[in-house]
Amino acid sequence: MAVRSADDLQASIKQQLENNDDIEDISRALSTLFDVKISPVFCSSLFLPIFQHAVENEQLVESVDTYVLIFTGLYKYLLKTEQVCARHSFVKCVGLIADLVKAVEFENNDCSKYPFAIDELELETLLFVLSIAIRTCNEMIVINIEAGETNHNVYILWEHLPCLLNCCITHFDIMGPMITIVTTIIHNLIQIGFIESYPMQVESLLSCLLHLLQNHNNDTAVATAISSIIQNHPDIKLRNPSEIATFTNAIAIYVHPDNLDHARAVLNVSCLLLRNYYKTPWLDDILTIDFADQLGILKKKTGLLLQYCQDLDNSQVEHMDIDSPVNHKDLDFSSILDCSVVYKELTRKTSSIVDTLVAEETIHQDRLMLIDKLKELAIQTGNMDMISLCKNQMKDIVRFVVLALEFDPEMFIEIAAMFEYEPAQFILKYLEYALPYSIFNTNDNNALLHISSLIDVPFKAIFEEYAHYIILALLLEPDATKRNQSLARLQVVSGKPQIYKHLATVKATKITTTLALNLGKPELKKQSLLALNEMKNIVCSTPMSLPQYLSQYFVSILTNISRLISEWRLKGVTSREPYAIKGLNESMIAMGAGVSEYALHLVKVFETVSEIEDYQSEALGLWQTFIGVLDDGAFSFNFQNIMNGILKLLPLSTTQVRSMVAILIQSVLEREIELNSPSFSDMPDLPDYKELHTVRQMLKDRLSKNTDLQSEITTIIRKLDSPDDIQILSELKKLDNILRGNPAIKSGLLVSKLLYLVQKYASNKEISRLVGVCFGKIGAIDPSLLDVKTIEDEVFVMRNFADDNENRAFICRLITDHIFPAYGAIRDENVRLYFHLSVQSLLQCAGFSDTGKMANKTSATYLAWSNLPASAREFLTPFLNSSFTRSRHDESSGYPIFTVAQSFPEWVLKWYSCLVQETSAKAKDIFEACLPIVISGATDVTMSLLPYLVLYCIFSGSGDATSNIIKEMLLVLDTNAELRNDSIRGHMNQQCLQVTVAITEYCRKWLNNIKLGDRGNESQARRVAVFLARIPDDVMAIAAFYSKAYPQSLMHFETYCKRNPEPLSPEILNYLRQIYTRLEDRIDLIALLKENAGVLKYDKDLVLFESQEGWKDAEVVYDIRISDNPDDIALYTECMDSLKKWGNYGKIAEINMPAWAAQINSRRIDSAWRVNNYHVLDKAVAMSTERTPEALVGCVLSKMRNKKNLEAASIIETSRDMLVEQLSSIASKSYRKSYPIVFNLQLVQELETAQAAWDSDNPTDSIKKLEGFWNHNYENIASNYQYKHDLLELRKAAFFDIRPKSDAQAMESKLWLQLAKSSRKAGNLGYSLKALLKAEKISNMTYMNERAKWYWVSGYKEEAMNLLLSKPGKDVTNADAILASKFYTQDPSMGDHVEIKVYFRKAFGNCENYVSYIINATAKKGSTTSTLFNIVRGSYKALSLGSKYYYSNMSRLINGWFELAVIYDKAPDKVSTESNPPVVYFNQANIIMGKITQFVRPYQFCLFLTRLIAHLSCKNEEMAQCLMKIIHTVFVAYPSSTVWLLLGVEKSKNILQRKRMTKILDMAQTSPQLSLIIRQTRELVDALKLLADYRIETKSAMNLDMRQIRTLFKLSRLQDLRIYIPTEASLYPNLPEVNSKETANIQVFPKNLPYIKKIQPVFMVMRSLQKPKRITIEGSDGKQYKFLVKSEDELQKDARTMEFNYAINSFLKRDTKLRDHELYIRTYAVIPLGEKWGLIQWIDCITPLKTIIDNIWVSEGRHSVGAMSARFKDMGNGLPSETARAFKNVILPQCPAVFHQWFLRCFPEPNQWLASRTRYTKTLAVMSIVGYMVGLGDRHAENILFDETNGDCVHVDLNMLFDLGLGLTIPEVVPFRLTKNLIDAMGVLGYNGLFTTTCEQTMDVLLRNKDALMSVFQTLGTCWSLEENVRLESEGGSSTRIDSIQSRNEIAKRNNEIRQKKTFDEKFELQPGRDADRRVKELIEKASNPDNLAKMFAGKD
């Protein structure tokens, strides 16, 4: 018979249901579905059709069981396959129950969702269907319980139970049978602890049950349910006790001794009422009834409660009248009555019960009754733990059990079960009593034999295994006679005369530890002290003091204390015994000053104790003892830890304890003052408690804190490097305090540290949370404004754990970077013990022992130990001598593991254990040492270990081991390679994927590391490469995609496509589309859609509509696509994102998708608050939702609005914790990648700030104080519309929308205005207008400028200009003028307005437009000199205002002045008269320039200083004097930076230039400081010149030592110079946009720039033609800086080109359209020190393109680049067409594009890969266009380099300009370099995406800043001309010098002008827009054309 497919079976089932076939047949058919793994969605869809079948079934009564069986089977299957569907089915059943109940009650009902009309069903059918649904729900709950799963939707059923019971009451005659089912459900919910999580409905449920019992008093199930609820949850606070009392009063009359269940229910309810202060009048009668003994304890409890409450009057209690004459001042009527007194009284019965239980004469049956009585007693004392109840009688119970083992084993089993133990477990638990008793107190060995058999330990071995119990019993026996008898008995039983000493020695650790803790028991203290001394004498072979002896076991003592603390936390208050704390106190006293070695561990214990409820006093006592025994040195060393620890006690303590803490703090401070007289600058801020007032005042008097904010931040950043978590925590708290008052902090280094800490301390919730708080307060600063460097600390094991030193380094880093941080976060003391075991073993693996034994202080072991941080050594020292032992962990699980593991920790443990089995030798020792930590569940540490372990197995394991690893990883990848809706294992799958990714990343990094560093083991490299190749890239890509790791997904997709070069499949195209969408990479998305329009038609339309703000059209397309794919959540997500950008939040709220209800609801919450629809918000918050940051924001706002501030605060904390967890789990430490999370942390902080403001005494003032912070924060946030819009909307909602009206309306109006501006700029004009009108309404004023802008962008240009010009002239502001000039620039026809001239007169701030206006106005009159003068004057005024248009204004100033000089020189008459304008205007310009330094800041000339210096050769003395004054002023202001530029021309061959520079330097030498700088620089430059001229013949790079070369010896001796190292940071200032008083002393150069400490003596001679030398300068900051000393090279041109690049970078950064795109040219410092020599800043980690390609080709076994070039050269002797054909057909196939591999090797981490590739593409594109525009040549593959740290493209040798490359031997016929390899690295889109767009954007910026760039380049051109003149002058003979120079100068100038005209006039004649874009495409086609490349290949690539 053929096997039917799943689709056939589905169709068959559907048909059977439609045909109403027999339900039994359907049931059989359904059972076959599960075997073929049918779709869970289909199974879930069957529920309602099957109910419909039941409705229509005429034999429904007989078929009820069958229906329930079918539903149960379906649910079981769904639970195994897809939990979401299972939950959805449960919700359907519950919803049906609710609707059926409504139908029974004749309530209105919306039943349109069902395929049958509920309202039309007959009552009998209704009830039977209801019965099926109820029974089905109950079975579902049972299935969940059996499977150990939690059904989070049970609360829905729970909410409907009261209604269901009410229905049963109303229709008892027909619904009576359902009561049993309902009560069963209640029992099941109690069993799973559900009521504890959802207590709200308990009272309603009790009322219903009591009402039901009142009507049907014989219903045992109901009575039992009532008792079960109250007994399991006795602390229910009743809101309406009178209703409960009324029902109970009615029921009480039926209480009878024969109905115990009824009586028990009444007594339980009575106790509950009494605890709610409600007297029960029926109790007096009931308590007189003589019930059976089973109710004796409950009756006693009721009587005690009644007696306890007898002074309460009913009316007073009912109305909570605490002001009544009766004194109830000790009662808290808002909470339930404390029963501790009653419980204490009841527990007194325990002793008598136990005594009777263990008495010999008690018979077996009576003992069983006594056991039941003890169980009842435990229930009635608040469900007290049985062990706690019987703790004082346990010794007697155990002794009885020992005897019962032989004579009554059944009783032994019953007693063990009473304590919830198996028999063997019970004996093991209490072996400390059982074993000594069986040896010392019995006459034979029978009892001991029984124990031995029970615990499965051989009789002889039991003495060794549990010796400590035996020896302790002997040591603590105070009666000498009994002790001797017991000792003799032990010798007899064991058969060993010397067994006492032997056993004491073997178990010395456990015995000593127990005795030390027993010191805390008053009754055992004396005997324990004697016993310790006896143990010391037994164990120690040499005399030793007791403190020395205890020191050997102190770690064990602390470990046992920790274990006890964990037990306290688990078992609750009643199980605590403070003797252990007292024992620790006594042990510290006995140890004395020796405890200082264990300070760090003690502090952890003290902190843990302080966190236990009501144990703060004990913690304080520990601190007091610890401080008291420390000597002065140890006290001072631990002062910070002591203060931090004590301060943690304060918020946890009562007032009384706080007073004692304050006294201790004061004494600690006084002792520190006496010892060290500190300033307390590092003291944490003391909290503002009144008890600390005296201490705070004392500190205030002494405190000498540095008030410099930057210094404080710098100090904190430095101390955040500490490995000590306590120190980290302290510094973060200081930072938090600073940020409260100074949120405007921008520090890239601080952000780097915080990102590093949040990942390093992921398991330390306190540190992580504080990092989150600090991020929130700092705010989401735009990444482009910060220099955030990634802190890399990864260790690579390159010798496969075969090298001791490498192993030791690995262990040290593992401990300091992973184990130590994780240890600090541990709160479970048992987990801490696992860490102790691992640390001890790891120290042994590292070879560390007692520091006294590491005798050789120069050994590698000792050096490694001494290099550990002090706090780490303090942590580790106790483990050098510890002697922990552990049982071997045998994990027998085999592969596959992932499919059977039920949780992530289980998977990690089992996989780790399997992998460890493959290890050997030292690797085995290390990884087995870590096993306890792995077992403890410390997944952070385990995840850090797994990559190393896997790599070891790849190298050293068997082939099967590697195959198993790959199979396991592929299982993880395959499981993640599909879309899942919160599946059962969803979170686990994600975590497993993270591990898998981390393993592959580490392998790639290792591979890259060995490739670069150690090629000694090529076989290992090959094994890793093969391993990685066996993991399919497409599988990894899809898994990463569904895990939302989009950069990783893109990386693997592109790698897959490179290896499979066929056309992209529709599936991959769709993935790429979604990836680009989620990465917000619209550029590549558009390119992808253009290239694949046929496959992605709809997507192209969507992108087109959205890019043009056609949101309505986009919505239509989404509707069509969703109708075609109604179950595609990705479409819904994209649609909602689009709607959000449009602002159509109402549409989002309407979207409904039941299968993804939680995800949709999270969007609904986010939308509701934005449109002020708080009704929808509150409703959505109450529903199940996906916990996204956006949804949690809405939840907080809902709670705040409804005054539920505590709930709001709780959600804020939850949200922050969730975000911090995300921040710590992202693979990359990149700030840019983390930015969305940091932004959400800021939103969380904004919510917290809003609530704090409104909780303050004066909310309005509090809000107004935030204005400065708001402005700073808004200005510095990423200039992305969505970020700015979300921030503003949140502030609007949190501060105003949900609040009552305030007086801060100006700020509310400003918020709306900012919303209007941001929306207008984003193109959302509808929302912009709405926000603008709202802002004007609130402020009652018109925002004319914003209205004008809105009119303008909306196309109403005339209205915009008319509105703007409607202001009277006197009211026109600079802002008005700038806006008018911008309008004029965009549409010159607007300049016809007469009024606009008023505006332009005020437009000096926008000098660029102003100058254009004057030039146009004056050109008609022919007044060139006046125009130039106006340019000089206008530019000078603009510069005096600031540097916003710096390059434009400074270039115009200098060029205008110099042009005036040229005209002046040509004037025949030099007399200044009105008829001689050239002279008049030039003289006036000189007057301005003579005093310009009074108004224009010196730093504004720094970037043009070289150009000013170049003009010192001018012949006009007045101009020269002005230039000298400016240069001198700049030099005096910044001597250490500018001296390099001045000394570079001191020896110029131009006489005028040389003399004037000498004069400037002479003028400066009046200052001793400047004189020293000049002298030192001259010495350095002279020495560097000797190095530049030093010649040596070498064909390869080589290192030389200056000290061995006489002419260079002086250079190596120069040191401690007061000259800045000439880096970019020291040469080029960062200019403020606006000049003001505040910026007068602004730091335009970074603080603490490094001076030259010395020149390293060893230098490298490079192998290039001119043999440049690479030197290393050591800075005063300790860092090393490298420079290239070049000779015979015109570095002036390189320097000027680099300055031009700086100008372009300024324009790119300033451009508002491109600010987010981060376009720039990679620059470096070029310092000409003479005509043909100088320095170039060396950039580490950059590699030429040729070298990169060459290395990859050779590594793949191909020919080198040089060989291929030579081969092609031989082919190129024919015609050009033949050459091109040979290039295409022969060369290209043998020269594959491999550049993309370089990115994979250098950047194996996906986020870094994507970021680096993006930077590569952008920097290559920018420099390509800039190079084309300036005609940059000589662009061969060794002059284009790439940065291995970030992917930047770096161009060097920039001195071939103006298209001179066309004149090379092999002409450069391409506009820029764009070879196949360069395109290869751009990704699957090639140059069609980001590269082309960046080229277009760069071209657009250059063209839009044409005038400014022309000015800058004109200035540079003049400099080149002048420098050329100098060169010509130096070549001319002295006799003909003047004529020759003049002639040559004219020729040089004319040639230069021709070049400039060709370069600029032709290339800049393009207009921005389509013409420019078309030109870019032409350039790219020309640059990538194989025919062109063929012409250049032999010489270049």
Image: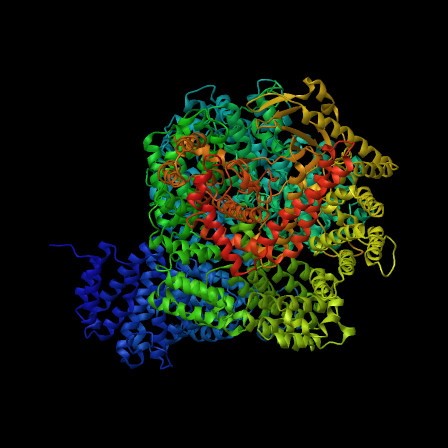
**What count of labels does the image hold?**
0
Q: Is residue 926 above or below residue 419?
A: above
Residue 1052 point in image, percent of width and height? 41, 45
* Residue ranking furthest to the left: 1
Protein image colouring: rainbow
Q: Is residue 1492 above or below residue 1690?
A: below
Is residue 1167 among the parts visible in the rendering? yes
User: Residue drawn at (29%, 81%), measured in percent from left and top?
Assistant: 120
Q: Is residue 636 above or below residue 229?
A: above
Relative horizontal placement of residue 1148, taking residue 1377 as reference (left or right): left
Q: Is residue 680 above or below residue 93?
A: above
Is residue 148 among the parts visible in the rendering? no
Q: Picture quarter containing residue 643?
A: top right
Check the picture and name the quadrant holding the N terminus: bottom left
Residue 34 point in image, percent of width and height? 24, 56
129 or 1550, which lies in front?
1550
Residue 390 point in image, percent of width and height? 48, 47
Residue 888 point in image, percent of width and height? 41, 31
User: Residue drawn at (20%, 70%), measured in percent from left and top?
Assistant: 62
Relative horizontal placement of residue 1650, taking residue 1033 as reference (left or right): right
